[in-house]
Amino acid sequence: MKRLILISGTMGSGKTTVTRALQKILQPAAMLDGDWCWDIKPFTVNEETKEMVQENIAFLLRQFLHSSACENVLFCWVMDHKEIAEELLRRIGSETLSGVELWQFSLLCTPETLETHIRQDIEKGLRTEGDIARSIARLPLYDALPTVKIPVDNITPEESAEKIVAFIRSGKQAV
């Protein structure tokens, strides 16, 4: 049975790195980072670009889900409102999702851990100082999501991925 695994978390929580680690464990697996579908300079957020990005993501996820080469399809993105994932699943379509096991996880960390991660990205030129406050402000939004919460403080991305795999293999909760 195919799996679609959605990994959410605020900017700097480690979504991409954890999802890459997860891909190594759950092969055969395809990985898509939602940010790759919105790599526009300058970064532009308006109704047109939102529509384009949602369609890009849904198209690629459908293609991965239809491929016999992919047993696990992993997607990471800032999905801080349940409507984001709901809209994405609507766009993928119930026909494509029929028979697909759906899992939704949120990576959670303290504001201190988040600031440390973002400062590392600032040093690499990937983020700005303003990203720290914006990201910390979004942390509480993840508490309300219908996702499995994975605390990532003081553990490696590989350990976070192992926690996700253990949860999936336990069969406790498929969304």
Image: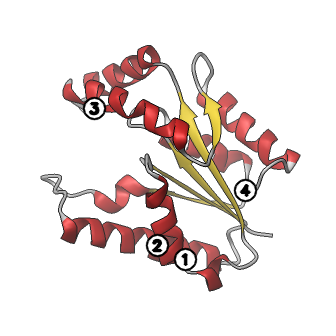
Residue at (62% x, 41% y) in the render = 21
Q: CA distance from mark 1 to mark 2?
A: 6 Å
- Residue beneath label 4, please? 27
- The residue type indicated by label 2 comes to Ala
Residue at (12% x, 52% y) in the render = 42
Give the numbered dot on residue 58.
2
Residue 163 on image: x %, y %: 73, 34
- Residue beneath label 1, please? 62
Residue at (78% x, 42% y) in the render = 167
Secondary structure under the numbered disc 1 in the rendered image: helix
Q: Quadrant of residue 120?
A: top left
Q: Quadrant of residue 161?
A: top right
N-terminal of the pair, mark 1 or mark 4, is 4
Q: Residues within 10 Å of mark 2 (few under 14, many from 20)?
A: some
Q: CA distance from mark 3 to mark 4?
A: 34 Å
Secondary structure under the numbered disc 2 in the rendered image: helix
